[in-house]
Amino acid sequence: VGVITDGSAVLGLGNVGSLAGKPVMEGKGVLFKHFADIDVFDIEVNAEHPQEFIETVMRIAPTFGGINLEDIAAPHCFEIEQALIEQLDIPVFHDDQHGTAIIIAAGLLNALELQGKTLDEAKIVVLGAGAAGIAIANILLDWGATRLILCDSQGIVWPDRAGINTFKQEVARRAAPDSRRGDLPEALKDADVFVGVSAPNLLDAQTVGTMAKDPMIFAMANPDPEILPDEAR
């Protein structure tokens, strides 16, 4: 498997470049080997534009049985992944999108079962509208969520909000047909679920107190979460 990055969104550090991303890619290789006995080449690509990255991966793809894209910033990651899926005959997976989304979906289904709630009934707020947030929102909507609100640094994302990219716009069309507006605290009123893939300390205890009884909180900003467990409790 090729674990491949351009270093534009490295593990809580942002756009630090391909070389600085190498230790993270090596770490992913260790996980593949330890848990699945799969061998990995970590590949760090100096590419400023999506098409340069796509062409590089296309040329080296015959080496691999699969491609794990890693730590590529949105919105370029969406274009890169889709192009490679369409043009290659091996699996292509963007970990920051689908790895995160699958884990959240699994954990949330378990949490909902423990709470006696269902995915279609739960009010879900996703904070963070980059690669992970968009993928999480899409998988939950695909699986039957009907009360999902997507938020970014400017607050609730609605379809006609100025300045949003097409990926946010598409999720907003699916998730917020009432074109709800407001900030994060407004979105979280009576919410059953908070999913955070954004930045540290963006959720406080007072806002948690306005959520539904026994809310489910997935605070996953890396390396420091939106709220720490003790404060949330």
Image: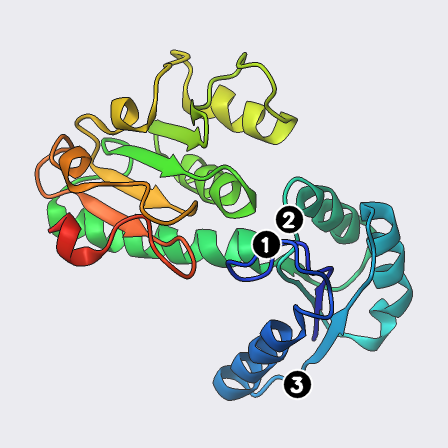
Amino acid at pointer 1: Gly
Q: Indicate the position of residue 112 as horizontal and vertical percent values.
A: 20, 47
Regarding mark 3 in the picture, which secondary structure is present there?
A: loop
Task: Give me the residue at 65% from left, 54% from top.
Answer: 15
> In the rendered structure, which disc, 1 or 3, sits on the residue that comes first in sequence?
1
| Marks 1 & 3, CB-CB < 8 Å contact | no
Which image quadrant for residue 103? bottom left
Binning the other alpha carbons within 10 Å of mark 1 as few (below 14), some (14 to 19) or many (20 upward) gives some
Q: Secondary structure at mark 2?
A: loop
Task: Give the answer, above or below, for where 125 lies relative to 62.
Answer: above
> Do the numbered discs 2 and 1 sit on residues whose CB atoms are within 8 Å?
yes
The amino acid marked with disc number 3 is Asp
Q: Mark on residue 103?
A: none
Which residue occupies the foreground of this view, 73 or 86? 73
Instruction: Tell me the tag on residue 73.
Output: 2
Front of the two marks 2 and 3: 2
Helix, strand or loop at disc 1?
loop
Q: Picture coordinates of residue 69 (x, y %)? A: 67, 61
Number of labelled discs? Answer: 3
Which circle marks residue 14 in the picture? 1
